[in-house]
Amino acid sequence: MSNALTNKPKVVSKGYKYFMVFLCMLTQAIPYGIAQLIQPLFVHPIVNTFHFTLASYTLIFTFGAIVGSIVSPFVGKALQKVNFKILYLIGIVLSAGAYVIFGISTKLPEFYLAGIICMVGSTFYSGQGVPWVINHWFPYKGRGVALGLAFCGGSIGDIFLQPITQSILSHFMTGNTKTGHLTSMAPFFIFAVALLIIGLIIACFIRVPKKDESVASLEEISENRSQAKIAKAHEFQGWSGEQVLHMKWFWIFSIGFLIIGLGLASLNEDYAAFLDTKLSLTQVGLIGSVFGAAGIIGNISGGYLFDKLGTAKSMAYAGIMLVISILMMIFISFHPFGDQVNLYAGFGWAITSGLSVFSYMSGPAFMAKSLFGAKAQGVNLGYISLAYAVGFAIGAPLFGIIKGKTNFTVAWMFTICFVTIGFILLIIAAIRIKKMQHQMAANTQDKVLLDK
């Protein structure tokens, strides 16, 4: 009797589980924020300092995205066999080391190598690590909310990292933001130390449940299993991964998402380099903070929109917001450096772009199941994510080439065309796939519940 009581798993409190969510938020805010989110702020100073072309330097994002996407599945497999803390620490050390390499680099291949290492490192603790932690602590109830809160950390980090980065850069630059150059590579070493210290502190506490711990009470497990059985009986099972590849509208949907990636790459990676030519470093940092705040609202509200409005209407809303944000960039391009209207339009870009972040952050996961069903949602999510990643990887250097041959105004006009065409194709495909779902349901004797 005493042995049975001793061997009974200890139920972890809800407060402790949300402490793990907080650590994931902190991971996204600082280690991931330094590794990925502030890198665009270094583009213009580095290009000016070492006399690179914008097109050649922005290949750093392309190479990072490609190698990161290749490494990610291997990291996922390693998580099943290697202690999570070890892999978390490996990722932190890689990203911090990458910033050291940035600090000693003078040639393009060296910067490319640093960018690749930084992206690979973030895959360990962010891309694969954060979902791994959340899925273990929330196997049943509350997983969606926990994931949403965890990934809001990136937007929260943007609020304070953007102005801090701009302030640090201003102390190690000479000249104005358009033609100025770095007088020291010290900012990279400062952020390397910050990333390493914060990462090590988080690693001391973040973990997955132990074998003798239970993350849910027996009543909760029983209740959720019962609910899962009921939901499964009425859930739209959809198509297998092989069947999806033979669907015409899947390919149109994927092409649309790829084209969207072409546009969003420039909007996400090159906004700081562009705004540096129109505003002061402090003002650009302030705009970045507004974008971070709007991104928090966008991440939280996006899930609600998907649940209430479905894929087509939610993505249409996101598309409209993104078109408005790019129009703000085109508007700014016609005004000289320091014009006050640039700051107001910059805020307009930050708000509209931030409100749309759900379309490419939580959007792929929602659309994979909503459109193609539960049968192979993991495989189909991989297809959708790959399409966007390819577009994003091509988009950054393409924007640089167009800007180099013409100017920022023309490059932003290409961006708005990509986003508009991509969203039109995606929304039309989503509507047609939904019609196919209803036809499939009508031909089935068992009633299924279809998402909007």
Image (cartoon, rainbow, N blue to C red):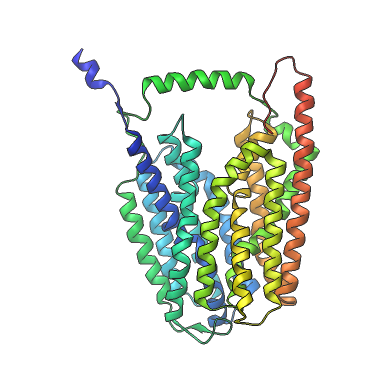
Place residue 265 in its image quadrant: bottom right
Left or right of 312, for residue 270? left
Whether residue 213 is visible, yes or no, is yes
Place residue 271 in its image quadrant: bottom right
Q: Which residue is drawn at 69% across and 75% down?
A: 333
Q: Nearer the viewer, residue 398 or 215?
A: 215
Whether residue 113 is visible, yes or no, is no
Q: Position of residue 296 (x, y in %)?
A: 52, 52
Residue at the far top in the pictured view: 1
Q: Residue at x 69, y 35 (%)?
A: 371
On screen, residue 436 above or below 424: above
Q: Which residue is drawn at 67% across and 25% down?
A: 236
Q: Quadrant of the C terminus?
A: top right
Left or right of 204, for residue 170? right
Left or right of 41, for residue 262? right
On screen, residue 397 above or below 366: below
Q: Position of residue 377 (x, y in %)?
A: 62, 34
Q: Where is residue 208 in the image (x, y as percent from the top left)?
A: 37, 38
Residue at the far bottom in the pictured view: 175
Q: Nearer the viewer, residue 404 or 63?
A: 404
Q: Which of 196 and 446 is in front in this view?
A: 446
Q: Which of 439 and 398 is in front in this view?
A: 439
Q: Position of residue 373 (x, y in %)?
A: 66, 30
On screen, residue 450 above or below 288: above
Q: Which residue is drawn at 53% across and 77% down?
A: 46
